[in-house]
Image (cartoon, rainbow, N blue to C red):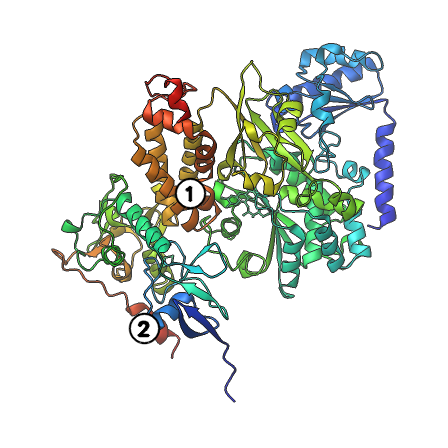
Amino acid sequence: MSPAVDVKTLVIDGIDVSARADQTVLEVARENNIFIPTLCHLDGLSDVGACRLCLVEVKNSPKLFPACVLKVEEGMEVTTKSDRLLHYRQTILELLFAERNHVCSVCVTNNHCELQATAQSQGLTHVRLPYRSPRLGVDASNERFVADQNRCILCTRCVRVCDEIEGAHVWDVMGRGIDSMVITDLMQPWGESSCTRCGKCVNVCPTGALFDKTKVGSDHPKYPDFVPYLNMMREGR
Amino acid sequence: MTSEELLQIAEASTAEHEQFDFQLNVCMGTGCMSQHSDKVKAALTEEVAKSGKHCHVRQTGCMGLCAAGPLVLVEPTETRYGNVHEADAKELVDSLGGKPLERLETHLDKYFQGQQHIVLENSGHIDPEKIDEYIGRDGYQALMTALTQMDPQTVIEQISKSGLRGRGGGGYPTGLKWGMVAKAGKGQKYVICNGDEGDPGAFMDRSVLESDPQRVIEGMAIAAYAVGASKGYVYVRAEYPLAISRLTASLREARRRGFLGSNICGTTFAFDIEIRLGAGAFVCGEETALIASIEGQRGQPRPRPPYPAVSGLWGCPTLINNVETFANIAPILRNGPQWYSSIGTERSKGTKVFALTGKIANTGLVEIPMGMTLREIIFEIGGGIPNGHTFKAVQTGGPSGGCLPEEHLDLSVSYDALISAGSMMGSGGMIVMDDTSCMVNVARFFMEFCMTESCGKCVPCRAGTAQMFDLLTKICDGEATHADLDLLIDLCDVVKNTSLCGLGMTAPNPVLSTLRYFKHEYLEHIDNKYCRAGVCACAGKAPAKEEVTA
Ligand SMILES: Cc1cc2nc3c(=O)[nH]c(=O)nc-3n(C[C@H](O)[C@H](O)[C@H](O)COP(=O)(O)O)c2cc1C
Ligand code: FES
């Protein structure tokens, strides 16, 4: 006899779907080709529920839930698209664009950027909020990579991939609130840090905040799909 | 320790004090200490020795009326003296046994009579560093009874029946929370006492920890027995050095008397407590951030569920309650849940300690039964607004709460009434404002607090509070338009509904409540560049009468 698998059935956007009990709403939605925008989530890394783009409505709850960490439940009715959710997602994206200095025309990841693509997918046409235009630096001390704080959205994918996959924990977050900043080691320049130069953080970075020096123009696609593959190989499956 | 031994300690402690004709209790809380009450105590001790009177001078915790410090309480006559200085010592000691020293009497009967002390029953009456004095006032009886006569389930039932709700702000039913942790398996569990207390203007928890730390330890031990935990942590902010040193001393005393450690009260129950210091971040009062901080990680919240009751400290089921919540436990078990639930309102039982601050005559701590009106608290106990100014608003709930105007003064204080009026109970800060406060500026102050205290993890709280702060600054400066106000209102909605933790979810409350009750002040700043309180730097003039009503 095969071991009992705990299966749940639920409804997402009116579609009946089935899931393993340990799955999240985001996973199940994607399996069923239901698109939910995300930025901090990356397959293969732990979830932190920080960008809030994946918020969904659950029937009979006034609260919104981040789909990336919301475990499926039997009979759950989830709505991933509504005027309210769209407005919240657009405003969150506006908050991100206005927070630092996102200038697509001079960005190496122009047209390969997840922030840009997400904004387009959510129909964002302009930013109502005043740009905060902070003065932030660029760290090019690493022989291979550059960190441009102006483009960072603090998704902490770099922090998690470095800790959870590479096992180096070079990246972390410093400061709090609007002054938060990703740093290498204890704010040593990247080139002088304990960085292993594996480049994982560059590939998982959704924007042009971390990029490869050899890339010029807007010629910098990223390949973050290696993470689940690595995990799978390590688990020996 | 058996109950007979406990009784003997209590009797010995009472007898020790009864051999004196008088007790001079000198407040050594942070407030009075800052006014050099330690010197007053030294001077009194010296004068007593000189006078040959049979009198005992001792340090106690906070007596509540911090504004009139240093405070001295004479027992058994219950005479209260305020603003006592070293130079007054001789006169004060001389007056013992004769007529009270009129000059120094506080004359604040209304302040003390309107209150009902349960959490603060020992504050100002015992030396917080002497466990036997606590035992002398029925301390550790509740733990003894719970361990020797009740099973854990019964303890939880008693707490549930009492109707006690969490005093950390959310008001979650305490018995229900204990039950959840108790049911969460049989493995390692933890009990955490939340003493982070980061709300501006609030100092209830500090005062309880300074004045009566054994009560918190007893409450935690009872909780640990009820939920099946063997290890506890008290999380206190490092800015509370006196509370930390008294708590450290008290933990040692409790171990010495066998209320912590193994075989507590002669049973198989084992429990011990460690102190963890916070670095003063407001967000570390949020339970998941606090747990991360104890674990040695960056103090930032994580999404719930899972709740700490299921997966808390190091992934184990964890009970986390506020200092004041734990301080209520022993009296509930001692006097029975019916006694407790007879105090308060339908859905908010017992008493609540508030830190009264701002434009009010009697600044200090008050403990009142739930259901008392704001008017009674502010105008009777608090003595009203000083210097001939008029009342404008009262702020409760700290940065998560709201400002209530005069028409809500007859609101009786309870969790639900405050929320429906657009504020909240919070942990007990109560800031009174008069006509010299600009409500837009007040909202801006709280937004600045939330902005700088945001951990920065989720986008709406990190970037949203900063944007709202900028918009509020623009309004204060008389440079905003109606479009800016609309944007502010929209951001309030977004940040409230999309933030990860309670900090962001409640950060818009001060704006929303001032917009609800004082919208005219926003409009005056925008339309007339006018600040009626004269606080903001905008240069305009008062609007003509008919414009104000628009
Ligand atoms: C931003 C934030 C700050 C908080 N600060 C405190 C605090 O200082 N003290 C406290 O007891 N609870 C605080 N809380 C509430 C705790 O998360 C938790 O609900 C509480 O400690 C539970 O105890 P209780 O059930 O006894 O109230 C805070 C919550 C948030 C969202
Ligand atoms: S993807 Fe869920 S919060 Fe960012």
- Which numbered disc covers residue B322? none
The relative height of residue B159 versus residue B91 in the rendered view (above or below) is: below
Residue B237 can be seen in this image: no
Q: Residues within 10 Å of mark 1 (few under 14, many from 20)?
A: many
Residue found farthest to the left: A217
Of B401 and B454, nearer the camera is B401
The residue shown at (81%, 55%) is B148
Label 1: which residue? B454
Q: Which secondary structure, mark 1?
A: loop
Q: Position of residue B434 (x, y in %)?
A: 52, 21
The relative height of residue B546 versus residue A90 in the rendered view (above or below) is: above
Of B259 and B74, nearer the camera is B74
Of A100 and A212, nearer the camera is A100
Single out the mark in the foreground, 2 or 1. 1
The reply to whether discs 2 and 1 touch (Cβ–Cβ < 8 Å) is no
Q: Position of residue B404 (x, y in %)?
A: 53, 32
Quadrant hosting residue B541: top left
The relative height of residue A169 versus residue B391 in the rendered view (above or below) is: below
Q: Residues within 10 Å of mark 2 (few under 14, many from 20)?
A: few
Quadrant hosting residue B116: top right
Q: What's the residue type where badge 1 is placed? A: Ser
Residue A89 can be seen in this image: yes
In the image, ligand 2 is in what quadrant?
bottom left
Q: Which secondary structure, mark 2?
A: helix
Label 2: which residue? A229
